Image: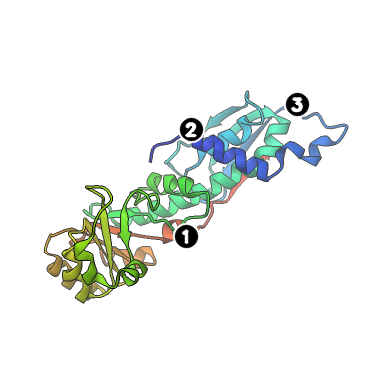
Amino acid sequence: MKLIKSKVRESVKKALLEDGYKNDLSLKLKNFNKNKIISASVTTRQKGTLSGSSWFEESFKIIDKNAKIEWYVNEGSSFKKDSKIVRIKAKSEAILSGERTALNFLQLMSGIASKASKYSKVLKNSSIELLDTRKTLPNLRYEQKYSTSLGGAKNHRFGLFDAIMLKDNHLKVFGGVSKLKNLKYKNKGDFLEIEIEKLSQIKLALKAKPDILLLDNLSIIEIKKAINIIDNNCLIEISGIKNPDDLKKYRDLKIHYISLGDLTKNIESIDFSLNIL
């Protein structure tokens, strides 16, 4: 996913305002010099994949535009336990008031990138692509999808506006899969994906000429049968996998995508620590 600096700055500014950085009471002590230039470094207590460096930097530069940041690990690269990640030199005001926001972004995003990397490695040398989903934290979708892409996953649709995806509830409103053969699109060429929960739905769904059929929570035996029924008439995506070990069971199937809500829904943040030097 492309890094959009304006989105980064907007997101960080909202986070800093949420934390009340302009009214940091600890900096209002009479004998505190908030303009003193100090240095700090960040280390990690566990291994992972780095994501969120631009958000980290903005957390300090919004407060002190002259802040100097030196990275020891590149964005998207892996790091080992107890590694030194980054060094900051800035006004004490910036480091002390921006610390929590900076680390919040770095630990969240690196946790997502690390998980995506772990899953992606299972599919290495396979023709199957790993997809993320819309199961994201409110107002942090850009950050989360950016991080999954750094970890080796491919971004599925960003929102409701960039693809038509008809899931079980849509089909109930339509009156069933059989009603989809007469779909009328708002724009010619709109991308269509249909969720399948039963093998009996496949032939009916194919009449709508979908780009992808999503096989949701089907067993491996059912998926193999579905592949034969679909017979290369559209792309195939599967969902419902819970962990990397389960992913291994699917890597040799003739499917195109595996989507995982787990990449952004069940987040294990990376443990980073910032200390004044």
Compare residues 81 and 255 and report the one nearer the observer.
255
Circle 1 sits on which residue?
265
Residue 277 in view: no
Quadrant where the N terminus sits is: top left
* Mark in front: 1 vs 3: 1
Which of the two labelled residues, at mark 1 and mark 2, occupies the earlier sequence position? 2
Q: Residue 234: x percent and y percent?
A: 17, 58
Measured from the top left, where is residue 94 in percent x and y?
68, 33
Distance between the alpha carbons at the discs numbered 1 and 2: 25 Å
In the rendered image, residue 232, in percent from the top left (x then y), is placed at: 12, 60
Q: In this figure, which residue is indicated by the disc labeled 3?
A: 36
In percent of the image, x 24 and y 72: which residue is there? 220
Residue drawn where x is 45% and y is 38% of the image: 75
In this image, 266 relative to 127: left or right?
right
Residue at 24% across / 70% down in the picture?
177
Ranked by sequence position, the earlier of labels 2 and 3 is 2
- Looking at the rendered structure, the number of numbered marks drawn on it comes to 3
Q: Is residue 31 visible?
A: yes
Identity, as a three-letter code, of the amino acid under mark 3:
Lys
Does residue 216 appear to the left or right of 150 in the view shown?
left
Q: What amino acid is labelled 2 in the image?
A: Lys
Q: Amino acid at mark 1?
A: Lys
Q: Secondary structure at mark 1?
A: helix
Q: Which mark is residue 5?
A: 2
Q: Secondary structure at mark 2?
A: helix
Q: Gap between marks 2 and 3, in whole Å?
A: 28 Å
Sequence-wise, the earlier of marks 1 and 3 is 3
